[in-house]
Amino acid sequence: MARLRIGSRGSQLALWQANHIRALLGERGHQAEIEIITTTGDKISDVALAKVGTKGMFTKEIEEALVEARIDLAVHSLKDLPTELPPGLEIAAVTVRANPRDVFCAPHYKSLEDLPRGARVGTSSLRRQAQLKVLRPDLQIHPLRGNVDTRVRKLEAGEFDAIILAAAGLDRLGRAEVVKQVLPPGVMCPAAGQGALGVETRAGDVVTRELLKFLDDSAARATTTCERALLKKLGGGCQVPIGALAEVRQGILHLEAIVADPAGSQLIRESRDGHDPILLGEAVGETLLERGGEAILEAVYSQGVAVPQQP
């Protein structure tokens, strides 16, 4: 029986995730305690994420605790984890993936199509904003920060006509009743790694890696590796307008990805099948760059939008 220290952010969703891993370890007879670590992203709650510009803003302090052996493992939303990990750290497990898609939430409307002209929609994601503006240039897009409950409260208080959230977070916190429409990737391509949990450890900690091996899901590992390879090829993160969703279809990986101008003036979409997750991600990323993605991303950076590397 092992005694482990799990590092986690203190948000309601982060603690659900950490407790989920702790429970799974407990089923194997291992004891674990959770260490709450405040990250840069937690301290900055009143600014749109795309304007903050801190690499690993939701992970840096947790990874420092891991490197310094103050904790034994860290549980992250995989979409928060930068594509390049600090030296000496590794992703020991990617758990069974929850629904990776985004969802439309609104008290008075059944779908994105039902929203009236000029409706107020809340999101602080450039990826979601860009795709919304392509679909519905008439909508008013406004910043929305805070944890899941805070965002839902703002919706219910009438601050917004609708908000766009990740399905996985609402499901995990038992708030799926606010969902009116699950958005297919052809409408709203999700963030790379969305819906998956990444369990990070020290690369040399063979004992902990072996203890966590049972948590690693092959399909989730393959699909998220593919998405993160694409993200790395594009040099971006969750706060640039990049979406990616890989799925295993009859034993073959299928990747769909987009790069979009934040103003909604251009959206480039590419999809392809393959067998090697990294090669497929890199190939689709290269094609997106060649088809105009490079110009879009350069424009985003030159406009002074500070971009953290990957929620």
Image (cartoon, helix red, strand yellow):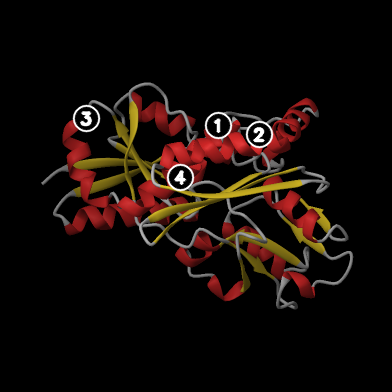
Label 2 close to label 1 by CB (< 8 Å): yes
Q: Earlier in the sequence, mark 4 or mark 3?
A: 4
Q: Is residue 220 visible?
A: yes
Q: Earlier in the sequence, mark 2 or mark 1?
A: 1
What residue is drawn where x is 64% and y is 64%?
152
Is residue 100 found left or right of 213 in the rendered image? Answer: right
Query: Could you give the CA–CA distance between mark 3 and mark 2, rounded to whole angstroms?
Result: 38 Å
Q: Secondary structure at mark 1?
A: helix
Q: Earlier in the sequence, mark 3 or mark 2?
A: 3
Quarter holding the C terminus is: top right
User: Quarter-wise, where is residue 16 in the image?
Assistant: bottom left
Q: What residue sits right under mark 1 in the picture?
A: 233
Which amino acid type is marked by label 4? Leu
Front disc: 4 or 2: 2
Q: Residue 121 at what x, y percent from top left?
A: 77, 60
Query: Could you give the CA–CA distance between mark 2 and mark 1, rounded to whole angstroms?
Result: 9 Å
Which amino acid type is marked by label 3? Asp
Q: Residue 106 at what x, y percent from top left?
A: 70, 72
Which amino acid type is marked by label 2? Leu
Query: Could you give the CA–CA distance between mark 4 and mark 3, rounded to whole angstroms?
Result: 20 Å
Q: What residue sits right under mark 4 in the picture?
A: 78
Q: Earlier in the sequence, mark 4 or mark 2?
A: 4
Instruction: Examine the rendered structure and indicate whether residue 310 appears above or below residue 54.
Output: below
